[in-house]
Image (cartoon, rainbow, N blue to C red):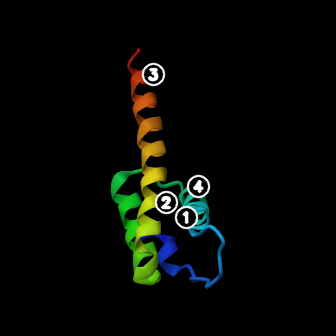
């Protein structure tokens, strides 16, 4: 279990919830240096469990955008290490 499970959720109003969730997820990813699929999925579950259902779609959208970048970067790293 990762340290983010010990984190405290903070309620806040947002003009752009997707951007804010994405920023928060990226901070956690970088702070804890998680890049494995299983760990990222655990982070997603943490965000879903800590937030109201009304935000689940936005959370999944933010996570999907991060996932796309992480998996694309991983693919590039794999290609360059093969040479």
The answer to whether residue 3 is seen in the rendering is yes
Q: CA distance from mark 2 to mark 3?
A: 28 Å
Closest to the observer: 30 or 55? 55
Please state if 28 lies on the left or on the right of 56 as rendered. right
- What x and y, as percent, mark residue 19? 60, 61
Q: SS for tag 4?
A: helix
Closest to the observer: 67 or 62? 62
Q: Residue furthest top?
A: 83
Marks 1 and 3: in contact by CB < 8 Å? no
The answer to whether residue 43 is seen in the rendering is no
> Which residue position is annotated with label 3?
80
Q: Earlier in the sequence, mark 3 or mark 4?
A: 4
Q: CA distance from mark 3 to mark 4?
A: 22 Å
Which residue does the image show at 41% across and 64% down from the upper left?
A: 60
> Which residue position is annotated with label 2?
62
- 10 Å neighbourhood of mark 4: few (<14), some, or many (≥20)? few
Q: CA distance from mark 3 to mark 1?
A: 32 Å
- What x and y, as percent, mark residue 14? 65, 75
> Which residue position is annotated with label 4?
30
Q: CA distance from mark 1 to mark 2?
A: 6 Å
Q: CA distance from mark 2 to mark 4?
A: 15 Å
Q: SS for tag 1?
A: helix
Q: Earlier in the sequence, mark 1 or mark 4?
A: 1
- Which of discs 2 and 4 lies nearer the camera? The answer is 2
Q: CA distance from mark 1 to mark 4?
A: 18 Å
- Which of discs 3 and 1 lies nearer the camera? The answer is 1
Q: SS for tag 3?
A: helix
Instruction: Name the quarter where the N terminus is drawn.
Output: bottom left
Q: Earlier in the sequence, mark 1 or mark 2?
A: 1
> Which residue position is annotated with label 1?
18
Please state if 27 lies on the left or on the right of 38 as rendered. right
Q: Earlier in the sequence, mark 2 or mark 4?
A: 4
């Amino acid at each position: 279990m990762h340290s983010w499970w010990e984190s405290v959720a903070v309620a806040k109003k947002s003009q752009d919830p997707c951007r804010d969730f994405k920023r928060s997820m990226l901070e956690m990813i970088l702070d804890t240096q998680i890049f494995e699929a299983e760990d990222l999925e655990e982070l997603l579950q943490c965000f879903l469990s800590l937030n109201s259902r009304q935000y689940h779609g936005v959370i999944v959208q933010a996570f999907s955008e991060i996932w796309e970048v992480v998996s694309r970067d991983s693919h590039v790293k794999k290609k360059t290490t093969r040479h």
